[in-house]
Image (spheres, coloured by chain):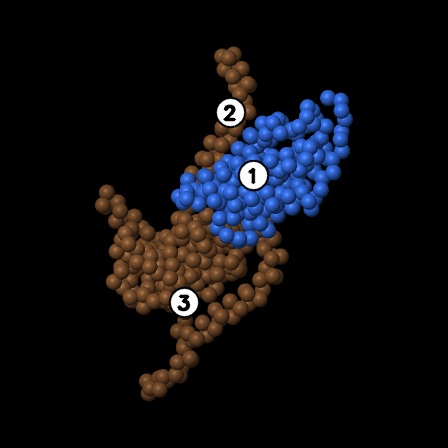
Chain colours: A brown, B blue
Amino acid sequence: MKNIFLFIRHYFNFLLFVSLQIFALYLIFSYNKYHEAVFGEYANQVTGKINSRYNKITYYFHLKETNDSLMAANEILYNKLKFDYLLTDSVFTEYIDSLSSDSTVKYRKFKFEGAKVVANSVQQPNNYIVINKGSADSVQKGMGLISSNNGVAGIITDVSDNYAVAMSLLHKDSKISGKLLKSGETGTVTWDGAEPNVVEMTGIPKGVKIAVGDTIISSGFSTTFPKGIIIGTVESFKKNPSSSFYLIRIKTRTNFYNLQYAYIINNKQASEINKLIERAKKQVQ
Amino acid sequence: MPLIFKNIIRFCVFFGVQVFILDHIMIHQMVVPYLYFLFILWLPFSINRSVLMVVAFLTGLSLDYFHHSGGFHAAACVLIAYIRPFLINILIPREGADNNYFEPSTQSFGGIFQYMIYAGLLALIHNAWLFLLQAWQFGNPGHFFVKTLLSTALSLLLILTAELIFPRKQKFRTNTI
């Protein structure tokens, strides 16, 4: 017994070193995309507060770009309004819509909620976006996040009271179902960790015609994003010799360098769909 | 105790520079600027080895919480904190220099060259362990060597700049050992 104590005393520094290393490695390997870090909630609150203080300062330097992107987003929305389309048809009559929006609430699937981005990175191997809305604003894990110009930005992975952390599209674990707008083929969009604002898409068969500049949209197959949110445009593509698919490089619609505002997508029917999928999985087992 | 306050202020400054300035600089995916570990390199000679490792662990862990990255930086910081005393023993030129000066600097190492070896080796170890763990976890080991070398070169440049901008004049304490 005495020898054990002597051993521990003699090698105390080495043992401390080994145990701290093991603890750090444990933190690394237990931190996967839907797993909270140790003290995750508290750490989120603290880092969120510091980041939002800092963001208040840097925000002023990005005001011009932010204004421009909000202006562009408004322009897109204005162009979708009904009075833009004048139908030269006798059926068309002008009327004021008196239907109360309340009666359609139960049919509502997606609800958008604006949030301020307080921290965002582009150069880490795994990038995260921190927004200033949390469980107090009914933000939940698994909700989608889009930028103000209708581009896919990320998926919420961790929520505390007033802040939420989203796995950015620039994340190794990020897998988003994408779709060619022109021909409708679906594939998977991932990030290879090389260049910010450029993601890769696989799963499009070689027979499909693609051109540089084609738009890739979200497929709407997952409960996270509705169909038609823009992921990006084709920057280059080549035929993958080892498989029957293209390897497509996509320039993202979202500019991750100056992300200032984002919209959280709340899918009201997500829990119902997920429950069904769970049940289907259980039946298979 | 002024030494503790000095180091707390240093920690805040290094941490702020790392999180709010260097982390926002995107040079290339192979070149990642890291400076925050200079805080561990500058800690006084007299610090207990166990305390040094715990302080390094907490430093790395705080950066990990900002990056949402588990414990990568904590692991790298603990490693350099463990190796630091051995390196100092080898590189300190004459007997008792670590008793005559408070902390590692160009003066206490007896020249800029020896000091840069000390800083360069620890920067290399920090970056190598960090990028090795990242390559292991994220799976592109091909970039590992180039990324380590280039990032270490940049870290050294940043350390030199920090030494030039904030010259630490150190008094020769006593010669009673």
**Relative to A242, is A89 above or below?**
below
Q: Can you see residue A161?
A: no
Which is closer to the viewer, label 1 or label 2? 1
Other-residue count near label 1 (Cα within 10 Å), few / some / many at <14 / 14–19 / ≥20 = many
Which residue is located at x 43 percent, y 55 percent?
A: A169
Which residue is located at x 76 percent, y 33 percent?
A: B171
Which is closer to the viewer, label 3 or label 1? 1
Q: Where is residue A225? Give x, y as percent.
A: 38, 59
Other-residue count near label 3 (Cα within 10 Å), few / some / many at <14 / 14–19 / ≥20 = few
The residues bearing labels 1 and 2 have C-alpha atoms spaced at a distance of 23 Å
Question: Residue A56 versus residue B28: which sits nearer the camera?
Answer: B28
Chain ID, mark 2 = A
Q: Can you see residue A74?
A: yes
**Relative to A256, is B6 above or below?**
above
Q: Amino acid at mark 1?
A: Ala
Question: Residue B57 versus residue B142: which sits nearer the camera?
Answer: B142
| Residue with the mark numbered 1 | B123
Question: Residue B37 versus residue A114: which sits nearer the camera?
Answer: B37
Quarter in which the N terminus of chain B is drawn: top right
**Mark carried by residue A15:** 2
Q: Say yes or no: labels 1 and 2 on the same chain.
A: no
Chain ID, mark 1 = B
The residues bearing labels 3 and 1 have C-alpha atoms spaced at a distance of 62 Å
Q: Say yes or no: labels 3 and 1 on the same chain.
A: no
Which residue in the rendered view is the most extreme toward the top?
A: A2
Q: Amino acid at mark 2?
A: Leu
Tell which circle, 3 or 2, labels the residue nearer the N-terminal end: 2
The local secondary structure at tag 1 comes to helix
The local secondary structure at tag 3 comes to helix
Q: Where is residue B174? Give x, y as percent.
A: 77, 26
Quarter in which the C terminus of chain B is drawn: top right
| Residue with the mark numbered 3 | A102
